[in-house]
Image (tube, grey):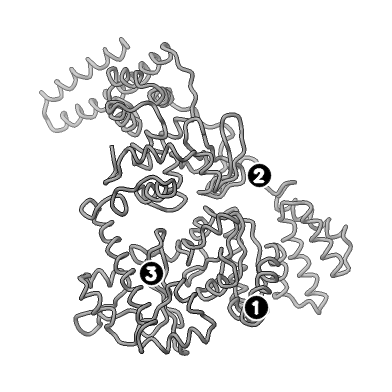
Amino acid sequence: MNYGMIPQETIDEVLRRYDIAETVGRYVHLTKQGKYLKGLCPFHSEKTPSFTVTPEKQIYHCYGCGKGGNVIKFVMEMENETFPEAVKRMAEEAGIAVTWSHGGTDHEELTPRQKEQEKLREANEFAKKLFTFVLRNTAAGKPAMDYLRSRGFTDKLIEEFGIGYAPSRWDTLEKALARNGFDLPEMEQGGLLLKKQESEGYVDRFRDRVMFPINGNDGRAIAFAGRLMSDGQPKYLNSPETPLFAKSRTLYRLYEARGAIRKTRQAVLFEGYVDVIKAWSAGVTNGVATMGTALTADHAAVLRRFADEVIVCYDGDDAGQAAAAKSLPLLEQAGFQVRVGLLPPGMDPDEYIGSYGPEAFVREVIEGAVSAIKFKLIYLRKSHILLEDDGKIRYLRDAVKLVARQDSPTEREILLKELSQEFNISLDTLKQETADVRRQEKLGTSGDIPDGTWNNVWNEYRSGARHPPLEPAYLQAERRLISWMMQDAQTAFLVQNRMGDRFYVEDHAAVAAYLYSYYSQGNVPDVGRFISFLQDDRLERTVTAIALEDAPFDERALEDCLRTVGQASLVRDIERKKEEMLRAERAGDIALAVQIGTEIIALEKKRKEG
């Protein structure tokens, strides 16, 4: 089997070249536990490792969120890529010849949704080239170029970040798109045009603005941010939500920064585009920004794929500090170590770099960033009047609550000492108050989630029984059969002859059908290769979960499982026949009801004989 125009031989070679432990290890810290490797899942927040890699079978599986697959699937998930995109990039990195068209298929084989998205990517790239041409090569773009240079943008920065200019005319882009065969209603849906309110036709969405392209996972433009050079409003105008662009999941410059982020396992989070660009020029190449919206859990989840630590570097004004304070719980919940870069009141990163220079910015703001708890304590001061005794007491009580929630006893000790010295309060008194808070909030000795609940954010509100409910015998039998079938082709052929698709669980029947097809094409047992054969998220998860089960095999166990599954299938068939007979009786079709009754008797007899 191949996918689009990707040769199966290429997929096999990619799987052979990329060791799953090595590839996953670039993103996740893994520790060896027997023949498995374990770590914290990169796809959801957890404190207790439930993410398992099996080098022997070249698969991964998370027992917390259920995600699993082979090395290609892992890269797809981490990079938010399609199967063809992941295979293409992995092949290029490994020096494997790429002989198929872009994306692994041609336009005729794309789904309608994929065709729409590809056309919008082409249109956004076209718009990006138009805006950059206008800025660099026309008289209309000269004021914008002068403005950028007055803000400290060099020609190198302008070129590297693809910055352009949208002219003040209403139809510059509209006419250019029309001349080049783009469908204008689609361009409206893609956020490049606006429909005229009082007549037919379309106008440019962006006019008289400096344009910052926003790139997607493949490095191509998917949206824009346009900045006014005057004092009008809105100062920034972003593309709307489109089939390509989701503000709640997109981070500006992530595509370009992810190499540096992966290398350092650290990301710097800014509020604005200009801050990212100026920080980049100062040597901070791991910076990203949100899309003119507050940080979301989706933003944090995307960033978590690449980084373990985030430095929040928001503006030094009240709004920026409030936004920073609001972002901390989201980032901590996603599993990040969080620090905060402190800027003078009222100053943003761009202004700081302009006033004090890039070296001071890196040294004082980035490298000198304070811990999240330190920032929380600093921010807490803003809501208390410390010149009055009542204000000091209220601040200390709130500060103690923050300190009490820290997991590390050492960190609590250091913070309490600082409070004790600053306010001339007994350290023992502060320790006692901290202990009281921890006891009241049931934080125990470690601050971890109490026993009886899952230690994962996905399941933090689920408190279940200590022992999971027993599975039906047929379910366990089906999983064992599939496990053995994946390990041995002859076992698969035997099950095919005896059972065919008569599995009780629909997904198990589907996996079995794929296995029959897989082996019929001469393939050898290989779980990683079989997963690439599936191309179905749900079935991939099912297969990886089953593949981790090491059920001992023998002929007797195989026969027992076949008998158990067969009995369950017969019971299901009998129930279905009874429902059919009841419907026939209600419809007054006595002959059909009698015929179905005879079939039920035959099935009952077969079940008893089994």
Residue type beneath disc 2: Pro
Label placed on residue 450 = 2
Residue 325 in the image, given as x and y percentages of width and height: 62, 68
Screen quadrant of the C terminus: top left
Q: Are marks 2 and 1 in contact (CB under 8 Å)?
A: no
**Residue at 41%, 24% in the rendered image:** 487
**Residue at 27%, 46% in the rendered image:** 5
Residue 377: name its quadrant. Answer: bottom right
Residue 129: name its quadrant. Answer: bottom left
Compare residues 316 and 13 and report the one nearer the observer.
13
Instruction: Work out whether 59 lies above or below 289.
Output: above
- Badge 3: residue crowd in 10 Å (few <14, some 14–19, many ≥20): many
Q: Earlier in the sequence, mark 2 or mark 1?
A: 1
Residue type beneath disc 3: Ala
Residue 253 in the image, given as x and y percentages of width and height: 48, 66
Question: Which secondary structure, mark 2?
Answer: loop
Label placed on residue 357 = 1
Q: Which residue is mark 3?
A: 223
Tell me how far mark 3 sits from mark 2, CA to CA: 44 Å
Instruction: Work out whether 594 lies above or below 300.
Output: above
Residue 352 in the image, given as x and y percentages of width and height: 63, 79
Screen quadrant of the N terminus: top left
Tell me how far mark 2 sits from mark 1, CA to CA: 48 Å
Residue 101 visible: yes
